Image (spheres, coloured by chain):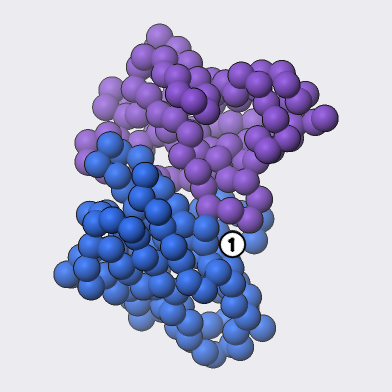
Chain colours: A blue, B purple
Amino acid sequence: SAVISQKPSRDICQRGTSLTIQCQVDSQVTMMFWYRQQPGQSLTLIATANQGSEATYESGFVIDKFPISRPNLTFSTLTVSNMSPEDSSIYLCSVGEPTGELFFGEGSRLTVL
Amino acid sequence: DAKTTQPPSMDCAEGRAANLPCNHSTISGNEYVYWYRQIHSQGPQYIIHGLKNNETNEMASLIITEDRKSSTLILPHATLRDTAVYYCIVRSGAGSYQLTFGKGTKLSVIP
């Protein structure tokens, strides 16, 4: 399975600022996704990061708030813009294997004050 | 994707088999059953998946009923490190990688 590294692993930010989370995979993958896990909740899909084109966002998530880049098949970034305390969550990068499984990074724990 | 129903929590004695049920009565013919788990403060971990036949790997066994409306994940010898939230997810195998996570079952393995 692919090895997925996320940076930062955790951060504390002030409201109104933006934070970019990086996801690096040790092999080329076609499908990459970004999930959010709010405190005490299950995971929610934010968007599919498409290589070379705009990300596909799920209902309730918009590009202005969560811009995503996917410059190549091993790397993606998620930016959380103009943060508020409600954005305090764990943000997870995941990749899809050809066999159908999804594998996840360890997540980036964001606290907004 | 079909909706799943799982008990919110279960306990299991260390060393015993943990049997985690999942109901997916609206599953359609091309949908697979996937199981993931999330140990506290970690990303979800893939466990196993199946379509209609029972499956076994080094982590667990997956038993799917003949009508495919329910399944059971079996951890044959639970250890304390198996304490986690276990998610049963049904999704189309036709090129879709998106997972819709429910609330899962919180399994507590007790010494």
Q: How crowded is mark 1: few (under 14 residues within 10 Å), some or many (20 or more)?
A: some
Find the residue positioned furthest to the right.
B111
Task: Identify the image quadrant of residue A109.
Answer: bottom right
Of residue A9 and residue B92, the one placed in the foreground of this image is A9
Q: Using residue B20 as the reference point, say whether residue B11 is left or right of it.
A: right
The chain letter under disc 1 is A
Find the residue positioned furthest to the top.
B66
Pinpoint residue A94: horizontal percent, then vertical percent. 39, 55
Residue occupying image coordinates x 44% and y 63%: A5
Pinpoint residue A113: horizontal percent, then vertical percent. 66, 83
Pinpoint residue A56: horizontal percent, then vertical percent. 27, 63
Residue under pointer 1? A38
Q: Using residue B89 as the reference point, say whether residue B19 is left or right of it.
A: right
Task: Kindly state the secondary structure of the residue where label 1 is placed.
Answer: loop
Task: Identify the image quadrant of residue B9.
Answer: top right
Reply above or below: B23 against B100: above
Pinpoint residue A54: horizontal percent, then vertical percent. 22, 71
The amino acid on which the numbered mark 1 sits, given as a three-letter code, is: Gln
Q: Using residue B17 as the reference point, say whether residue A100 is left or right of it.
A: left
The reply to whether residue B23 is visible in this rendering is no
Reply above or below: B73 against B37: above
Residue occupying image coordinates x 35% and y 29%: B32
The reply to whether residue B55 is visible in this rendering is yes
